[in-house]
Image: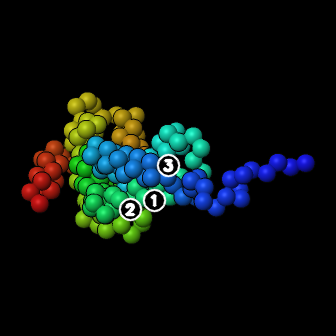
Amino acid sequence: MTSIDPQDDNPSSDTPPSDTPTARMLSWARNSAVYRLERQMMTEKQLFDAITRKARQKFEDISQEQLKAVADFAVKFAYDLNALNDADYAQVSTQSAVRSGKSKRAIAQKLSVKGIDRETAAVALEATDDLYAAVVFARKRGFGPFRRGVLDDKRKAKEQSAFARNGFSFEIGRKVFEMSSGEAESVLRKDAAT
């Protein structure tokens, strides 16, 4: 014998359908989006994932449909406020990464992980200079023209492989490796002037 739930037959029940988020959930999503975007710049994927993760913790009985609707609502709200823009995120992140010595390849991979599509990443990367980034990398690591120690075969192999592991082409790595300190400083000054 099966029991019948009286709410199943009552269409005027106050319980929302399982795929519709409650007003409390939407209010929380809006506040949570504002809080996160005030603290740091995020991509659409990062905001969606953060809201999804936190909503799962905050609302015990949330369904998958509600979870998606709440995260979509937060993303739309952020776009409406002009607080979310993947193209701007890609541009700022790319400029910062180049200044810290990251290669185009490493930056593209990081942007992909953050949810930036290939076209947006390509636009952000087109003005980057791998030579400048490689010189910054060499300066940070004390390689090539910034080397203080004696160059032996072991150190040479270490430096060249470090360039490759960090996404720089063999040609760029070799060029920076063979630069004089004056040439390296010239590359850094030239890029800083532009």
Asked whether residue 181 appears in the rendered view, the answer is yes
Answer whether labels 1 and 2 touch (C-beta < 8 Å): yes
Kind of residue sitting beneath label 3 = Thr
First of labels 3, 2 by sequence position = 3
Q: Does 110 sit left or right of 182 as displayed?
A: right
Identify residue for label 2.
Answer: 76
Q: Element type at marker 3?
A: helix
Residue drawn at the location 36% of the way across and 35% of the way down: 155
Picture quadrant of residue 115: bottom left
Q: Element type at marker 2?
A: helix
Q: Does 62 sit left or right of 143 as displayed?
A: right
| Residue 131: percent from left, percent from top | 26, 56
First of labels 3, 1 by sequence position = 3
Picture quadrant of residue 86: bottom left
Residue drawn at the location 29% of the way across and 37% of the way down: 141
Asked whether residue 166 appears in the rendered view, the answer is no
Residue drawn at the location 72% of the way across and 52% of the way down: 6
Identify residue for label 1.
Answer: 72
Kind of residue sitting beneath label 2 = Lys
| Residue 156: percent from left, percent from top | 36, 39
- Between 187 and 73, the residue placed more toward the observer is 73
Identify residue for label 3.
Answer: 52
Neighbourhood count class around disc 3 (C-alpha, 10 Å): few under 14, some 14–19, many 20 upward? many
The numbered disc on residue 175 is none
- Between 172 and 104, the residue placed more toward the observer is 104
Q: Does 31 sit left or right of 13 as displayed?
A: left
